[in-house]
Amino acid sequence: MTHTGKGLSRRGFVGLGAGVGVAALIGQSVFGAQAPCGALADGATFAYGTTGYGPEMDDAGLNPHANYSGWSCVRYGVGETLFKFSDSMEPESWLAESYEFTDDTTVVIKLREGVRFSSGRAMDAQAVKECLDDLLAVHDRAPLDLEIDAIEADGMTLAITTKRPKPALINYLCDPYGAIIDMQAGVSADNNVAGTGPFVATSVSDTEIALVANADYWGGTPSLANVSVRSITDGDTLTMALQAGQIDASYGLPYASYALFENPSFNIESCETSRAFFAQANYASPVMSDPAVRHALALGIDKEGFVEVLLNGRGAPAAGAFPSNFAFGNDTVSAPAYDPEEAKRVLEEAGWVDSDGDGVREKDGQRLHIVWLTYPGRQELPLLAESVQFSLGEIGFEVEVNCTANHTSIRTDTSAWDVYASALVTAPTGDPEYFFSATCVTDAPKNFGGYSNPDLDALAEQLSEEFDTGKRAELATQMQQVILDDDAYMFASHLTMGIVSRAGVSGIAPHPCDYYEVTAGLAVA
Amino acid sequence: MSRLSNATVRKMVVFAVLAVLLVLAALFAEHLCPYDPYAQNLREALQAPSEAHLLGTDRYGRDMLSRVIMGGQSSIASTLVCVAVVALIGTAVGVVAGWRAGVLDTLLMRTSDVFLAFPGLVFALAVAGVLGGGIQNAVIALCAIGWPKFARIARSQTLAVCDASFIQAARMQGTKGLALIVRHVLPNIAGPIVVCAVLDIGTMMMELAGLSYLGLGAQPPMAEWGSMMSDGRSMLQTAPWCVLAPGLAIFITVLVFNLLGDTLRDYLDPKKKGSAS
């Protein structure tokens, strides 16, 4: 499992008909596009509006050992993990100073000195062991990812033994569920925790987190005294709040809104992430089991048009599962480019012809009709569906879009869909293994289309035992090429995450892993 | 005929002509569209109104004018179907209840009271939510909430005429049952029902657009005014024509039908006729 529910705004339902139109026009003339600039008054609170926090995202509260709440714990500067990702997604030290694999299944981690929890307790190996033991006992994903057998604490040194060789263990420890909290202080009734980060939460609710600076922070005192993280789930509300100066920075603006902030009154910080928007073919469907149909479908997705126009250029057309900044990214694989003429030729050759002149091809009495299953929770997916519906229609497909929040139950019924388009963070740990084991290998939990290729399974086996990073990247490239050559998975684009703040705000920017947002460096000039 | 009623007739004719023009535009939408309302052209997305695209283009590069014209077809046709259905069902129920006093009357009227007790659009939301998206389901939902109003009007009108002397005369001539209702009752209660139906067109259109706006009516890529407004909502500040074009279409259409209903009421109102002559 990874996170499919983070980030950008869903299409919210905020009002009725013309009323909204009129209200928003009035809003425009009253608020204008100018936000007030300048420093925060003494004691004033820095307001951060985000579409990424709340029960709908499964990350309400700050307890890293529950659901995806670890994301909130790390994102808003309360908790820190042993290792963190660099901008190129390599693990680097954070609460840990260094690590060493003493054999295939044992890693010895040396902790940073002088770190204190906000409860006052000093962080040592014993405290970390207590936290990780609880994580393994209560969390749903962590025990399966980490496969830890035993943890031994000795002063500031931690020895972790895994059940089998675990080359990506350090990467997995960067996952926000690995945020280190003081288990003696525990988790409060409102899901607050004592972490080691630059900020301490004073109140936590499903809609807002109030933060104050941690004066004892090991990395130096943060420059802001008070920060408020506010959940604003509707993209248009978020846009207008930023225009009106009610918030100082925002996460998850709708694509169409960016044009309003491309002026000196605002900063736009962008970063390519490994969240991919992709489609998987249903091998149980009679139409999709024809390789020619899958290949024509892959040729019929206008990725450039989708990214440049529908996402306002705020994304990157994808070839494979991983973005270009990875060693095993887009540039290392080859995928079909948009070519409607070639798609028509492929279908023609395979015997799919439009014999009754209705614009839809047939073969042996079967119409080239596909059901495109997707969901509205990510604003990109309905746009992709509607664009593909037309571009495939030109080729001779008849595409029925089923865009529903109920997709999780429908996708398990292979008779109800032909193509399933979804969003997934393909490399949450900076390592390629997760994507294949979760989505592509035979009987993988997210392999909803029943795809199975023995070559891929063999490569996956090899990957799970390979310690050398360079060789892992090579294997990941080969594996992507296998699924692309089968036209089993089609990657449309990778998300470019944006954080927009008013002029004068510095030290807040999106990160390729989408984890770190509020940091000690956050400042207002 | 006096001057006042002449003016009323003139107004009514003007609005009737406008309404007929709207309906004709909806009927022949395919031939009026300058472009294919469903043809995407991403290279021409979000163009401001210009000579080539009088109302601009939406985010998929589709011509807004063509989509507004095409949207009229689904919006106006579904609204008219909807109003016709509720008027027929409501009138039938009302006449039966008014004609057959007693248990049946009580049963039918209490049922309609139950429906009237729900806030209209909220009930329609629930029905459309259960049935799922799609314009047919939105029409069914609106029909489910629309009929009681007509039932009440038809019943009270039926009660008023059922003891009238011309009904008694018809009875004495041997006319019975259904024939009596069709030949003598319905023509005499039709006025208020027609006025109510025409006035209802505007409301129905707004509610249908409201359901589509919320994603419970027309589904993409179908051109429908409510869903087009919902589609363009996030571009209100950057490409306002995406919302204004379908919004104006709703505004104008609803206005025309409401004014038509108003003048029709003035025209058919016996009191006004009397005072004017």
Image (tube, rainbow, N blue to C red):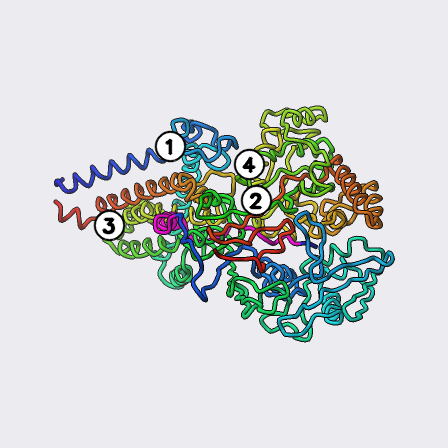
The residue marked by circle 2 belongs to what chain?
A: A
Distance from Cα at disc 1 to Cα at disc 2: 35 Å
Question: Callout 3: 10 Å neighbours few (<14), some, many (20+)?
Answer: few
Q: Position of residue A197 (x, y in %)?
A: 62, 64
The magenta segment is: A3-32
Residue linked to disc 2? A380
For label 2, the SS is helix
Looking at the rendered structure, whether the residues under marks 4 and 3 are on a common chain is answered as: no
| Kind of residue at badge 4 | Glu
| Kind of residue at badge 2 | Glu
Looking at the rendered structure, whether the residues under marks 1 and 2 are on a common chain is answered as: no
For label 3, the SS is helix
For label 1, the SS is helix
Residue linked to disc 3? B166
The residue marked by circle 3 belongs to what chain?
A: B
Question: Callout 4: 10 Å neighbours few (<14), some, many (20+)?
Answer: some
Residue linked to disc 1? B25
> Residue visible at 59% across and 39% down?
A400
Residue linked to disc 4? A308
Image quadrant assignment for residue B10: top left
Question: Callout 2: 10 Å neighbours few (<14), some, many (20+)?
Answer: many
